Image (spheres, rainbow, N blue to C red):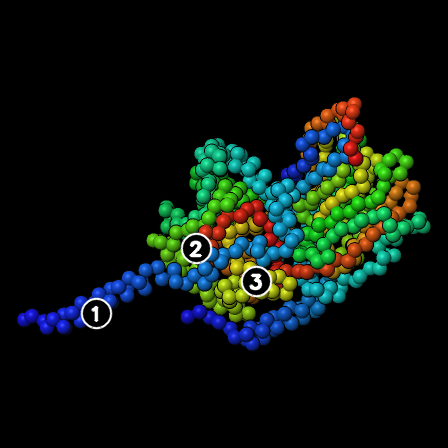
Amino acid sequence: MTTARLQVPNRIIEGDVFKLRLLVQHPMDSGFLRDLEGVLVKRNVIRHLQCILHDKEVFRVEPTTGTSANPLFEFYLRATRSGELYFRWVDDKGYIGELRHNLVVEPANQSQAPKS
Amino acid sequence: MLPSLSRRDYLIRFLQTTVGAWGVGVGLTNAQDMSVLGRVQDLSDARLRNFEEMVAPYVVRQTMKHEGVTLSLPMLADNGHLVPLSLKVDSPMTEASHVTHIYLISQRNPVPLMAMFVLGPWNGRAELSMRVRLSGTQMVVALARLSDGTFRYETQEVVVTEAACIDNG
Amino acid sequence: MLLPITALKRCCVFWGLAWLGMLVFAAPLHAQQRLIALDKLQSGLAFTGPEILDLQADDFANPALPAMDKGAKLWKQVAGKSDKSCQSCHGETSASMKGVATRYPAIDKASGQLFNLEDRIRQCRQKNQKASEWPLESDELLAMTLFVTSASNGMPIKVSVEGKAQSHFEAGQKIFMTRQGQMNLACTQCHDQRYGIKLFTDKLSQGQPNAYPAYRIEWQRLASLERRLRFCYTGVKAEVPAWGHKDMRDISLYLMWRAQGLSIEVPSVRK
């Protein structure tokens, strides 16, 4: 059971291009190292991680053994309207990790130009 | 009465150990035994790939330009297990012109591709950060594929130091 | 028969001085052996590079934080036949666990043994919660130890080395001062006498225990002080003691005494 944490700005206004930071707890075992008993630890890395918003994949990363343990991913999204951010990742063992976040996007003021 | 080593004795013991450790590292030829190899700077088993080899799986005949990509890693990494990496590709990220894929490629790691990202106009910005593993001093390549099928890239050399003491876990 | 006044005087002066001497020199002998003065104590952060400092300072992406989240979750989780969570008895860590990490290792009154914080947590879980054992260095134990330690963040270390703890302290001090392993080095030679000097590309630290459990990048996970100390044995090519060994706890006690006044600093990141 992996935990993950997500950071998004406190206030997001329609049109903003905002930064997301996702930190996933996962050993990302490369298959090259040994454990405390000296036994080789089998490879177990996240195969792919996707972010789905409004039923569309808006971010995808396919890491390998070259990605650090407890991976951090920072990327950007353009804010359109409120919705559920759904993160889903699968590793070599087939375990599925999930994180859901209610994304609140404030409507833009008529006079306010979208930031980017 | 506290123990104390003379400077000379300390140096001799130190050298004995470091030369011994280096000998062990070079003697090992099993590339899978990274737990010990990783400690030795001279990764003679880990061949350095050249740039063409690194990008060949992704760029076949398309245009590839050395521009438009800003890649940032520390010049000297404290530890190869966690090296922060940031990059930015100059792109309007519109439907007509955007970044579709970003590949992060290692020159020396057992597995060349460190991560692949899929992006689109919905991202607004082709900018990302992550943490990579680098097994030894090497060049890192960031390769971006654009929506028109062409590529942009940037490279950076990173010196990777390892922990001073030999550790088997 | 009366003693001559001069002889009596001499006698009194002699014994008076003898008692005074004993008081001065018998009073905490260890106090005289602080090789790093209290005002010269420095956390490992003082000997580390900019990347590590940034990682530790990042209050979102510090790689030790997922374990903190896990610890917080485990604190509230009901476990064992007792059907209680840690929270059921201890409430919020900010109140009940405040200062706890600053005074461990400590003598367990029931068994008379020296317990480190991990031992105390394991015992509480088994005895009071009647729950399954958390092995040493398991994810759960590390997460819980980190979470409990964090309640003492910023607080100065102060352990007791009196009473039953004294023999443990002296044993720990002895190990610290004794040469070991194929490299025939004593901890004190590097960590008291040569801190700040480079070994390969790493600066030698003072070997302080104030930031444990720490996320050690070399191991890509959170690690206990015990694991770190066992690695020190590997570092000097000495035979590594078994997990749970008394020596590790004795050394931990000595290190905590040596670190008196230094602040608890978690969640930390180290090479």
Q: Nearer the viewer, mark 3 or mark 2?
A: 3
- B169 vs B28, left or right, is left
Number of the label disc, if any, that sits on residue C14: 1
Task: Give the quarter of the figure containing the N terminus of chain C.
Answer: bottom left
First in sequence: mark 3 vs mark 1: 1
Above or below, C114 relative to C88: below
Residue C220: x and y in percent read 64, 51
Q: Is residue B138 visible?
A: yes
Can I make out residue C239 in this image?
A: no
Q: Label 3, on which residue?
A: C196
- Give the numbered dot on residue C257: 2
The numbered mark, 1 or 2, whose residue comes first in the sequence reads 1
Q: What type is the residue that disc 3 sits on?
A: Gly
Question: Going by the picture, which residue comes out furthest to the left?
Answer: C1
Q: Residue at x 51, y 51 (%)?
A: C210
Mark 3 and mark 2: span between their CA atoms?
Answer: 21 Å
- Crowd rating for badge 3 (residues with CA inside 10 Å; few <14, some 14–19, many 20+): some
Q: Is residue A5 left or right of residue C20?
A: right
Residue appearing at x 55%, y 69% in the figure = C183
Instruction: Determine the image quadrant of residue B33.
Output: bottom right
